[in-house]
Amino acid sequence: MKEETKLIQSILSDPLTGAISTPIYQTSTYVQEAPGIHKGFDYTRTNNPTRKILEHLITDLEYGYASLAFSSGLASIDAVIKLLKYGDEIIAVDDIYGGTFRLLNLYKKLGINTKFVDTTNTEKSTSLVSNNTKLVWLETPTNPTLKISDIKSISKKSKKINPKVLIVVDNTFASPAIQNPIKLGADIIIHSATKYLAGHSDVLAGLITVKDPKLYEKLKYIQNATGGVLSPIDCWLTIRGSQTLYLRVKKQSENAFKIASFLDKKKDSCIDKVYYPGLSYHKNHSIALKQQRYFGGIVSFSLKNDTIESSKKIVTSTKIFKLAESLGGTKSLICHPSTMTHKSTPLEIRINAGIQDSLIRLSLGIENIEDLIDDIDQALK
Ligand SMILES: *Cc1c(COP(=O)(O)O)cnc(C)c1O
């Protein structure tokens, strides 16, 4: 089956009633026939039929063995880090999602250290792998300058040095419609399903998909022991939203490509840099071509007049693009990373990551591209 068919087929109809839309099993517990004799469900923290459908769906989409649904992307990331113990080490992409950075900082005081490196450089990143390395943590594309790392070569080279190392890919920015990291050698995939998967800016959700049964058992134990599960109604919203994933991501990527090309033409006037993996001069364009089905729905750009004031004027002048954090929804959003998503990042790290004062990030929605271009054009003017 092709991916689009598989996505729809993966959402099983209800075995009890035949309901084609997944029922929301809004229950905490289940009646048992005799102690321990039940229909496979005993308590919703451990198992819930609506959650099971969602976990089955993402497993199919990501070519995994099994999946787990959490109450947020960060809750799922936290569960993965709990696989580690005192003295273990993580190697992570240097412009990692801010919330993950904050979480890794918390774990530092428990003796789990992270080394940050520019993972677009495979040699440099894998040279850090040692016997203590338990996780190599990738995000590709990254936020907001859309750096792309080569999942396949990093996985292969890291495992050659330490066969026990687990490759984790936070696949939030790409979504399964664009790339499938397990097929490229990853062991664990993370999704903040809050973004592209649920896709309508109406739910917080996190998903873990794993390749290996033993790893699944460990993470299932951690999830049940810590309890950050996704509620039945939020599972339903995520299942409901996911059904149009391929349609949305295709349209969002087309819109992003056209906006990036429009901004690129404005480089002789007000625009300084445009970041989009689909542009031939993007520094990771060739790996994006090889690794991704589309170039994605996010575009960032900076201004020749590189000030916070000038970019604030733009982000408050758009009418269709709404000023908000987050991404991946049907509505186009605009955001100013240096005063919003990255305001707590130290200045030097922020500038090193390419996040100039004037950098603006767009998350393209599914609106008509002519209206979107007109909106950005009038705001630039
Ligand atoms: C949003 C995001 C997260 C965190 O997910 P939440 O659902 O907000 O907890 C993690 N990684 C990336 C890349 C994200 O964009």
Image (cartoon, rainbow, N blue to C red):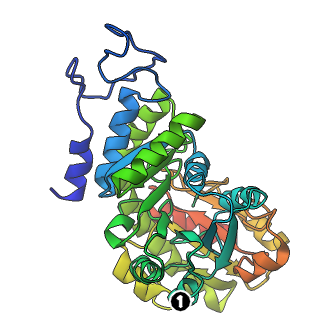
- Whether residue 117 sits left or right of residue 65 in the image: it is right
Dividing the picture into quarters, in which one does residue 303 lie? bottom right
Marks counted in the figure total 1
The quadrant of the rendering that contains the C terminus is bottom right
Does residue 310 sit above or below 33 in this rendering? Answer: below
Q: Amino acid at mark 1?
A: Lys
Residue 128 appears in view: yes
Residue 282 appears in view: no
Q: Position of residue 139 (x, y in %)?
A: 54, 69
Q: Position of residue 368 (x, y in %)?
A: 44, 59
Nearer to me, 60 or 267 = 60
Residue for point 21% across, 24% down: 15
> Where is mark 1, residue-wise?
283
Q: Position of residue 209 (x, y in %)?
A: 41, 53
Residue for point 79% across, 81% down: 306
The quadrant of the rendering that contains the N terminus is bottom left
Kindly state the secondary structure of the residue where label 1 is placed. loop
Residue for point 25% across, 25% down: 14
Nearer to me, 108 or 19 = 108
Residue for point 44% across, 67% down: 255
Q: Position of residue 170 (x, y in %)?
A: 51, 62
Nearer to me, 96 or 303 = 96
